[in-house]
Image: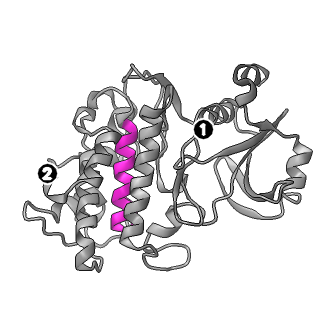
Amino acid sequence: MEAFIKNFGSFAPKRYSYKEIQKMTNKFHDNLGQGGYGKVYRGKMSDSRFVAVKVLNESKGNGEDFMNEVASISRTSHINIVTLLGFCFERSKRALIFEFMLHGSLDKFIYSQGSNNQSRQLEWKTLYDIALGIARGLEYLHQGCNTRILHFDIKPHNILLDKNFCPKISDFGISKFCERKESIISMACARGTVGYIAPEVFCRNFGRVSYKSDVYSYGMMVLEMVGGRKNIDVGVSQTSEVYLPSWIYEHIDQSMNLNLKIVIAEEEEEITRKLIIVSLWCIQCDPCDRPSMTKVLEMLQGSLQSLVIPPKPFVSSLLRSPKIQE
């Protein structure tokens, strides 16, 4: 920790004591949510700004993931990356202080059977803008930083939405750094969330791990945004519909006819088709066949007529039961 603060100098985020964290959160009164890492509480700074305080479980390893997240976000400054305002590292007490995101995480808005049993809540134009914003954030991590940052856990739960539904990438606990001139990195074990992990991360036969692994996760997430459901749904009636990418691919042909079980206005069809085609390119099994995030942005902002439907991009049986191989 002390070495980190020394290395970052004046660029290091502000360090707070645990007592200050308790005061900021009114003794952890307002719980915003929780995950395997710990809990998130609403807090208030001395200047009256609201913040989200992520308190990590005391049993969460030796602090490597925590320091990794602090170091990663401290290197960034982008409208589509969550802003780290400070941190607490006091023996076993660890917390991260972020800007407050009014609408919480993206997963609350895209699944048809959400916690409130509400159907799709966002307009297609809003979904498109969110997909575009996430792509810009990822391109920045891959191309805009002095040291390339690979996130490795892009999924709806890790995309936060501000009051204007501007998306911000969060949770850098398992991210990795690599030099910009390097495209391939070595990994001792698979990391990420099942359903969004690129094939090469758990099976080296698919290729080498690189920034293209984030591209795969992005594609899976956008398909979920379009389909309004998880990419694997064992609760559907027909086996052919269990794996979302397979189902979507089977219902899109060279005539651009889609048969989504969603009511889409005619003027919104172009957005939907564009998101689907770009996503299918992103989840190609061979990393070399996936576009860079720069190319993804170009495709999303270009004309629909210039996009070509890719080959069927997946081996669903492998993706349902990943096995880590060297």
Q: Write the start and end of the magenta stretch as one range.
A: 213-231
Image quadrant where residue 186 sits: top left
The N terminus, quarter of image: top right
- Secondary element under disc 2, as helix, strand or loop, is loop
x and y percent of residue 200 in the render?
A: 33, 33
Circle 2: is it few (<14), some (14-19), or many (20+) Cα within 10 Å? few
Q: CA distance from mark 1 to mark 2?
A: 36 Å
- Which amino acid is tagged 2? Val
x and y percent of residue 70 in the render?
A: 67, 35
Image quadrant where residue 115 sits: bottom right
In the picture of the structure, the residue carrying the numbered disc 1 is 173
CB of mark 1 within 8 Å of CB of mark 2?
A: no
> Is 104 drawn above or below residue 320 in the view shown?
below
Circle 1: is it few (<14), some (14-19), or many (20+) Cα within 10 Å? many
- Residue at left 37%, top 22%? 184
268 magenta-colored: no
218 magenta-colored: yes
In the picture of the structure, the residue carrying the numbered disc 2 is 308
> Is 260 drawn above or below residue 149 in the view shown?
below
